[in-house]
Amino acid sequence: MAYHLLKGKTGIIFGALNSQSIAWKVAERAFGEGARIVLTNAPIALRMGTIHELAEKVNAEVISADATSLEDLENLVKQSMEILGGRIDFILHSIGMSPNVRKGIDYDALNYDYYHKTLDVSAFSLHKILSTARKLDAIKEWGSVVALSYVAAQRTFAGYNDMADAKAILESIARSFGYMYGREKKIRINTISQSPTPTTAGSGVAGFDKLEDFAERMSPLGNATADDCADYCITLFSDLTRKVTMQNLYHDGGFSSMGMSFRAIEQYEKSFRDCP
Amino acid sequence: MAYHLLKGKTGIIFGALNSQSIAWKVAERAFGEGARIVLTNAPIALRMGTIHELAEKVNAEVISADATSLEDLENLVKQSMEILGGRIDFILHSIGMSPNVRKGIDYDALNYDYYHKTLDVSAFSLHKILSTARKLDAIKEWGSVVALSYVAAQRTFAGYNDMADAKAILESIARSFGYMYGREKKIRINTISQSPTPTTAGSGVAGFDKLEDFAERMSPLGNATADDCADYCITLFSDLTRKVTMQNLYHDGGFSSMGMSFRAIEQYEKSFRDCP
Amino acid sequence: MAYHLLKGKTGIIFGALNSQSIAWKVAERAFGEGARIVLTNAPIALRMGTIHELAEKVNAEVISADATSLEDLENLVKQSMEILGGRIDFILHSIGMSPNVRKGIDYDALNYDYYHKTLDVSAFSLHKILSTARKLDAIKEWGSVVALSYVAAQRTFAGYNDMADAKAILESIARSFGYMYGREKKIRINTISQSPTPTTAGSGVAGFDKLEDFAERMSPLGNATADDCADYCITLFSDLTRKVTMQNLYHDGGFSSMGMSFRAIEQYEKSFRDCP
Amino acid sequence: MAYHLLKGKTGIIFGALNSQSIAWKVAERAFGEGARIVLTNAPIALRMGTIHELAEKVNAEVISADATSLEDLENLVKQSMEILGGRIDFILHSIGMSPNVRKGIDYDALNYDYYHKTLDVSAFSLHKILSTARKLDAIKEWGSVVALSYVAAQRTFAGYNDMADAKAILESIARSFGYMYGREKKIRINTISQSPTPTTAGSGVAGFDKLEDFAERMSPLGNATADDCADYCITLFSDLTRKVTMQNLYHDGGFSSMGMSFRAIEQYEKSFRDCP
């Protein structure tokens, strides 16, 4: 179903690795709603993933960029503006990675070089993207920027490790920059706090399966999928949400507002039964 | 601009008094997006306002109902289902009134009969509407209910009085019922926490003008208008936000995430200047 | 261990039923810290519980009062001031009761008379106590009022039912009145959001045991006990916390800031094992 | 007035520069309550400030340590344990500094080296302190760690710049480490979100005076002073708050729960008057 919500709009989408990626689904949905887009990811992600399939599907060019490099970002934004014909309307930031998680280093014994890497890739990159866009005056008035987050920014999840700190500062950057860019150019910046999603990145967190099951049972509507998230992003890129800014928006089937559901406690209770 | 986001959908809209009402704008927008609706308000509001103009515009019937009366609500829901051809898709709750505010009774000396009236009209009515809808199985799966709230539910505003308590319990009802109705029928229930809006109800709060000015200067995007709110409601009634539930969604140009803006403090500073 | 933190202070403690009650522990602790107190509870609670044992222990008089009755409250406050020698320093509100919970009526089909009773007893009583105290100028400057709450005010717990709404509006009342009474008399009003506690009231909630176990495993420090809560209340009644007001203070071993602990997910995982 | 709340306890206090510092007041209060302490600050702060006066007053040794250096921290913790006779009971983290603020670089054009410095000094230092303490098993069971924060972690204040991000990640670190250290050693970690305080650091923020005035008028109890904060810290270091962890505790006279006070809006209104 297409509504033409993004007809005539253009945007840059960061973070599509493969067809499980949320960014992939957003690109498809945005294209379906009439947007023209540029896709980008880090060089290594371009090699490991299948983004070129997507590019063909949504008629987009792919530009390689390390989102921690101001030089790469400047090149990306300039090229995108050329390709898309001037200032753009929206940006999706769907980037996250923790070497500490990957190497199984516990939070209380973090490697600080890795920690800095986690934050640089997963959070500071948003600041750099916005700073570059602002310098080049690359986003139209009432443009919309969305970054993906997780409720671990507010509540601690065992195993999520330093990504919790990354999401906390990511949300802070969205607020801080949202104020600056809002007052100056009417650009809105929000984060979506998404259900645990079985993407390549998500599944990498230890114990992901059990957590996903628990979240599914806790959430009255069940977990939000990558497709659901793409739908939601479209509304935030559209002209219908112009006064929403500096918000962290839970998109999680209700999980964030639950303390305990009947379904989850019922399952939990089974853990105490004795085998005969 | 129409996107047909609500094509084929039906709903009930509570609280349109006159053309300044948020509910009025939502009705117009919903109609424009392809929805068929029923309008309702309390008998006295029907007489004092101009809802019949709206009804004509959006091709809707008007059904009188006191939202605190289970009998009226049952009649309303049944009639609406007849008119609209079965189960409905969305409900807007835009109802609020405080006799204590009207009579200038301070919060620390509330009249408790009035207090109960405030809560009954402004908050319990949401529970009664949902309870009636559920009993009559009146809302379709993935239906959407939105109630309008204000940031006074979280932070105290001088003069907002017992409406703060009403909004706090309104948001709690949205969560509590959101869980029940979500797990059972996949119906989502959210509140929108809207900027101060110069409706007939809003303007009734003492000192509204100065507060509105302050909020305007604090919010990087300025206050959200009733028209903006109507746009936002449309996204929440649409199929694109199906996994958002039990949330309080700030729609306020960024106000809720601001501590102090440059524009507001600059104005504040002027208050200290000496006249020559 | 006694620190004389409340030496020379006087207070009224609502809600001690028996030796499991949090209010009971608070009375003992306050007495131990040098306070002189008056105990109060509803007539039926005085008959059903063992408050007179406590009264003897802490050398306090017991005054019967229905906390929903302005007349009873006025009598209580006046008598307390006579007994305690003038204006008092602190109040503990530890009152909660839901006929809907007791009778097993589900949240989506509430009996509204019972609902009003739940709110009147569990929340409006705080307003009435404060309103009465203010009218009689019964609390000293920098006095401290604490009411007990639960995280269900923010997140839905299956089975907690309309008590969630009661706690939400209780916390709102604490804020709203905290502003009025603070600006006028420097009186601070806070709520403590306490772990699930196996009191007579707490244990009455369906599925309490499993929830308590889950909370214990989620909280890095384990659940806070009634004794722990009494200690915490003492700090809030003392002169060391004079600038804390209008806050909801989580006292829960960390539960409120947890999304998922290793211990809880480990237990949860066991629910999936097959019996051989 | 002394209560001996910290009798027999030992701790390390970071960040006392001069007699206006909050850490200075905490050291005095902790000493007054019976604690033995070690003072520490960065080499340059030791030279620029007057910490040795304090050291004499509270009978403490001063150990120079750059809180971003793991080597310095290891030395500090080891020496402190020797001086204080083994494992310690509490730590105060009162450290914050932004080169971007100092050099007047706007948030949307941050120097990223400075940004990293801001975060390293103001936030990562807490992780490094905790990580070092844990490695050396330097804190007793039920020990207490407090770090000072500001409401800018939740709401944007013009001019507070990248310190907002620093406070946001500081609070996240407190939660994340609070979970690890809590489950393992029952150590609690909290942040205090303090009123704007006219310390050397605080006053450095542009427009501090006007903001302080606004906060004073917004807060029903007025701003919390450094002395008030010291009192509050004592309660958090004491045995009376053992089950409070992973919390951000507002200590601000009610500011954080205010939307608009009568006093503040009254002053604001004056800004519109015309000079005759």
Image (spheres, coloured by chain):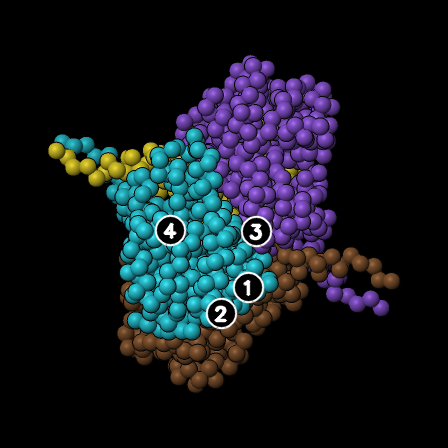
Chain colours: A yellow, B purple, C cyan, D brown
Chain of the residue on which disc 2 is drawn: C
Crowding at dot 1, Cα within 10 Å, few <14 / some 14-19 / many 20+, comes out as some
Q: Mark 4 falls on what kind of element? A: helix
Chain of the residue on which disc 4 is drawn: C
Query: Which residue bears the numbered disc 4?
Result: C43
Q: Mark 2 falls on what kind of element? A: loop
Q: Are marks 3 and 4 on the same chain?
A: no
Query: Which residue bears the numbered disc 2?
Result: C86
Query: Which residue bears the numbered disc 1?
Result: C137
Kindly identify the residue that appears in the image at 57 percent across and 30 percent down: B67
Q: Which mark is residue B254?
A: none
Residue D256 position by quadrant: bottom right
Relative horizontal placement of residue B137, taking residue B26 as reference (left or right): left
Q: Are marks 1 and 3 on the same chain?
A: no
- Check the picture and name the quadrant holding the N terminus of chain D: bottom left
The answer for how far apart the CA atoms under marks 4 and 1 are is 26 Å
The answer for how far apart the CA atoms under marks 2 and 3 are is 33 Å
